[in-house]
Image: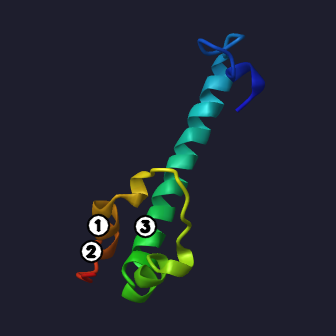
C-alpha cells in the first residue's frame, strides 16, 4: 500500500485507469498465490497427521492473554480432522 491510501475515507488522490488496472492485476496474482499456498499446506501439512500433531504440540504453543480464533477448541478440532480422518 502507498501512503495516499492511508487516509480516513480512502484516497487522497484519484486513481488513474492504469493504476486501477495494475492494482487489479496485482490482486489477481495475490489471489492465485494464496490458492497455491492453501493447496500446498493442505496437501503437504494437513494431510500428514505427524505434522498436525507437531503444530498442535506444546512446542508450537505460545500462551498469552489474547483471545484468538485459533484458541477456540472447535478450531483445533477442525485442524486435526481436516482431510486426514485423524482424530485427536
Q: CA distance from mark 3 to mark 1?
A: 17 Å
Q: CA distance from mark 1 to mark 2?
A: 5 Å
Q: Compare marks 3 and 1 and give the one earlier in the sequence.
A: 3
Residue 13: percent from left, percent from top: 72, 10
Query: Which residue is painted at 53% across and 43% down in the image?
Result: 28
**Contact, mark 1 vs mark 2 (Cβ under 8 Å):** yes
Q: Which residue is mark 3?
A: 39
Residue 16: percent from left, percent from top: 68, 16
Question: Vertically, is 82 above or below 35?
Answer: below
Looking at the image, the residue that sits furthest to the right is 3
Query: Which residue is painted at 47% across and 80% down in the image?
Result: 57
Dot 2: element: helix
Determine which quarter of the picture holds residue 11.
top right
Residue 78, numbered label: 1
Question: Vertically, is 73 above or below 19?
Answer: below
Determine which quarter of the picture holds residue 63.
bottom right
Dot 1: element: helix
Residue 54 falls left or right of residue 49: right
Residue 2 falls left or right of residue 37: right
Residue 70: percent from left, percent from top: 41, 58
Question: Vertically, is 30 above or below 8?
Answer: below
Dot 3: element: helix
Query: Which residue is painted at 24% across and 82% down in the image?
Result: 87
Q: 53 or 41: nearer the eye?
A: 53
Q: Residues within 10 Å of mark 1 (few under 14, many from 20)?
A: few
Q: Nearer the viewer, mark 2 or mark 3?
A: 2
Amino acid at each position: 500500500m502507498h501512503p495516499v491510501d492511508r487516509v480516513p475515507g480512502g484516497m487522497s488522490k484519484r486513481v488513474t485507469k492504469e493504476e486501477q488496472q495494475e492494482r487489479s492485476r496485482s490482486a489477481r496474482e495475490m489471489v492465485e498465490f494464496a490458492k497455491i499456498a492453501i493447496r500446498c499446506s493442505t496437501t503437504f501439512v494437513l494431510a500428514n497427521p505427524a505434522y498436525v500433531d507437531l503444530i498442535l504440540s506444546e512446542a508450537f504453543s505460545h500462551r498469552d492473554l489474547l483471545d484468538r480464533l485459533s484458541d477456540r477448541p472447535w478450531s483445533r478440532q477442525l485442524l486435526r480432522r481436516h482431510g486426514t480422518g485423524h482424530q485427536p
